[in-house]
Amino acid sequence: MPVFRWRETWEPLRDLERQVDRLLEGIQIPFPAIRFERQFPPVNLYELADEYLLTAELPGTTAESLELTVSNGALTLKGSRPAPVGVGDEQFRRHERMWGPWERSLNVPERVVEEGVTAQFNDGILKVHLPKAPEVKPRQIQVLQSNDQ
């Protein structure tokens, strides 16, 4: 008897995928490689003339639920996205958007003035302005002849 038959639906495999997703969502696994989940939130980092600009997509998040910290060359974004209201787990047929608390830390470029970091949040887009530190130019040191021997 053939294992695969043309024109048959793959619905049992889709059901298996959904069940495995539900199982993994409920487990706090200490090894990130086991979960095939992408880091949240997705970010872009741009280098502009006077600053680096980090943008993050945070649909469904409010400014009040965001916490940003910068320390020792790392920018940490923390927040929470509310779960859909009135939708039970058994109703999902695909679950790709995460909800609940999240946290993401990123290394900031070396030449950033941490005290000058600012952030704006509008229409679900977070913009973090990371001002560049002035270039440190090498200083020429004049060597004087000394008469002491």
Image: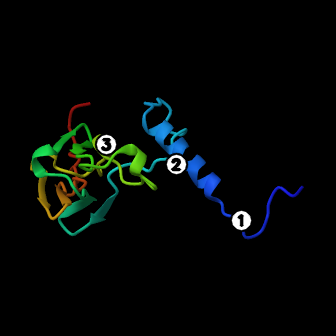
Question: Residue 8 bears which disc, if any?
Answer: 1
Looking at the picture, which amino acid does disc 2 mark?
Arg
Q: CA distance from mark 1 to mark 2?
A: 19 Å
Q: CA distance from mark 1 to mark 3?
A: 45 Å
Residue located farthest toward the right when viewing the structure as drawn: 1
- Taking the spot 50% from the left edge, 32% from the top edge, the residue there is 31
Which residue is under mark 2? 18
From the viewer's perspective, is 139 left or right of 22? left
Mark 1 and mark 3 lie on one chain; the one further toward the N terminus is 1
Q: Label 2 neighbourhood size at 10 Å, few (<14), some (14-19), many (20+)?
A: some
- Taking the spot 22% from the left edge, 49% from the top edge, the residue there is 141
Q: Label 1 neighbourhood size at 10 Å, few (<14), some (14-19), many (20+)?
A: few
Task: Identify the secondary structure beneath mark 1.
Answer: loop
Residue 28 image offset from top left, x and y in percent: 43, 30
Task: Identify the secondary structure beneath mark 2.
Answer: helix
Looking at the picture, which amino acid does disc 1 mark?
Glu
From the viewer's perspective, is 29 left or right of 60? right
Q: CA distance from mark 2 to mark 3?
A: 29 Å
Looking at the picture, which amino acid does disc 3 mark?
Ser
- Taking the spot 11% from the left edge, 58% from the top edge, the residue there is 120
Quarter of the rendering occupied by the C terminus: top left
Quarter of the rendering occupied by the N terminus: bottom right
**Relative to the observer, which residue lies in front, 69 or 78?**
78
Q: How is the image coloured?
A: rainbow
Question: Residue 105 bears which disc, if any?
Answer: 3
Image quadrant where residue 9 sits = bottom right
